[in-house]
Image (cartoon, rainbow, N blue to C red):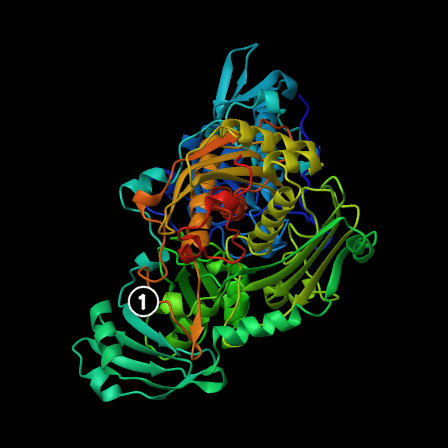
Amino acid sequence: MSEPSSIALDRRSFIKAGAALAGSLIIDFAIPLGECPAFAQTAPAPFAPNAFIRIDRQGVVTLVMPMVEMGQGVYTAMAMLLAEELEVGLDHVRLEHAPPDDALYANAILQSQTTGLSSTIRAFWIPLRQAGAVARSMLIAAAAKQWSVDGNSCQAQRGAVVHAASSRRLTYGELVDMAATLPIPVRDSVVLKPLDAMSLIGTSAKRIEGPEKVNGRTEFGIDVRLPGMKIAAIAVSPVLGGRATQVDERAALAVRGVRQVVNIDEAVAVVADHMWAARKGLKAAAIQWDDGPNASVEMTTIVGQLEEAARHPGAVARNEGDADKALAGAAQRLDAVYQMPFLAHAAMEPMNCTVHYAKDGCDIWLGTQAPTRTQSMVAELTGLPKTAIRIHNHFLGGGFGRRLDTDGTLLAVKVARNVDGPVKVVWSREEDIRHGMYRPYYYDRVSAGLDANGHPIAWTHRIVGSSVMARYVPSLFKDGLEFDVIDSAAETPYAFPNMRVEYVRVEPPGIQTAFWRGVGLTHNVFVVESFIDELAHAAKQDPFLYRKAHAVNPRALAVLTLAAEKADWGTTLPARRGRGISLQFAFGSYSSTVVEVEVALDGSIKVHRIVCAADCGIVVNPDTLAAQFEGGTLFGLTAALYGAITLKNGRVEQSNFHDYRPMRMNECPVVEMHLVKSTEAPGGVGETPTSAIAPAVTNAIFAATGVRIRTLPIDPALLKSSNPGTKEVRP
């Protein structure tokens, strides 16, 4: 089976794929990841044919990891890519974090050293394998030279080169000195293994970082301990743009263990010998705030602003045919408004950052998805050169896009500039929830026209909300558009002869928006898949069969059919139980989700079953992929059922898991995962399942009760004693 020559890295014209494999460099800056052998730091090696690999004289392979691990399993998957081509076992590979360096470690899709957009495997599928193949070819050449034989007569096997004809064998460790003297091949000239020759990729290899996590040795940013380190508790202005006007420093310093109080206007930190003293000191400080211009912001203000903006045309993302004319002539017209709330990330590891600031440099210990961006932002804040900003990256106790931003790091640096020695700034759970960077609130107007047979002949979709990309990468926001906010809206799995998609940018007062385990698609998939269900009902057709009739991509049809089959679509269910289905293309992967729910008479919802089918292209590690679908599905289900950040008097009302609640273990259904075998280039899975679950759930609720949910999170009050006789034909 032949190997794909390239990977489709970009689904939009806004992002261009670039080179991700750099030239040779011996990396001598490393962050030890613990005492587990898989993460032990090795001595500088003589053989480093590129920025990703070192091999020492003991034959130990070090992968200098450009991306970060936050539970998604990329450390194992990336190591598998390298080990496959290098012909070593995973037990031969050790890892260390790469230093911030876009020139060497840029993610080709994002064009920076950033872990996000479900892009790691998509971006490094070819480059990292090429890195391994380059090293393998050089080691074979070194053995051939030492034996004075033709290199084609030698093979790499399990960390060694063998010459079968003479039964000779040399380990990689024995060859590194010779290999280091040879010319480095051009990476595009090396031959990659065909899929049918792979022995590691496609297997459910055990997680490399698993033992460390099981035995508790994994070091997250919040675990950092340094000699002489102080701990700081922080209080941020409860209203965005506010500042502290009065701080009782004397009372705070009277708390045993408190060393100083640092007021940086938008926040106050109490620095102490330990966390308990810092928290007590912060409470004693009795901070009073000037709330600033956003003190009167309410949810009604924000939603009203979006509603008004939705009445006006926006920048056109797609315009085919004449949607207005087709709507006017349609046999049946449907209109709907969908709304999705602000959402917090609520990672298990709250925001934290340890900083040692000096006049000539700044060391920072944290878990970040964007080390080079962090380095640049700190350099801009301090005036220090980027080379003086040393980032020590760690495992992330949850990222979900929150740790793409640098606000927490910049606050920590501001505090550290006033502290002698290293200081760890730790946010409480309340600060983490109330001062997050939230998934935008979206307000969408959609309309569709059906012909006499129920076929869609017109589709319009006006998206109104904040643009995260316009803030994060302003250059990508052009002519009123950027790729993320229209993702899965400008391109859907379905064909509409007349289609218009628009975007109206509205930035809400008093709140900051950010990436949230997928942004645009987390709301666009909900709108599209919910409205398609409405069209099926209006056409008096089965929702699965309606999708099947109008989906245009064979891969989309395959996952749709598989999900329905595995979920027993069409079989009879008891009263007030229903099935719902969704279909999507996201991050290069096709997936379909079927949910079976039961709605009690009091409006409470029980999710009995979730069935996912996916075509993610070539799968590196099936077990990791399944885990991502399980976790991502439950993450999205939590948001659909419970997730909402609201404002009152300019303040975020939610504060902890009692009022911004996650799914409980006893509420979590089993997520059944089914894969379509594919030879297409790998697609992303880290964020993919998060967006598919919400419309499947609300569609199932409609099938069970006849109540159409267009605003999230789902309000059980709307489902109390609903009339089951109004529902559509039960799927």
**Residue 356 makes an appearance in the image:** yes
Residue sitting at the far left: 256
Give the residue pinned by disc 1.
Answer: 428
| Count of numbered circles in the view | 1
* Depth check, front residue: 160 or 455: 455
- Residue type at mark 1: give it: Ser
Q: Residue at x 83, y 56 (%)?
A: 325
Q: Is residue 432 left or right of residue 688?
A: left
Task: Between residue 265 and residue 81, name the one nearer to us.
Answer: 265
Q: Residue at x 45, y 73 (%)?
A: 360
State whether residue 250 is above or below residue 63: below
Could you say which is closer to the camera, residue 336 or residue 556?
336
| Figure check: 384 above or below 18 | below
314 horizontally vs 651: left or right: right
Drawn side of residue 299 relative to residue 238, left or right: right
Q: Percent x, y for residue 570?
A: 53, 29
Q: Identify the secondary structure beneath mark 1.
A: loop
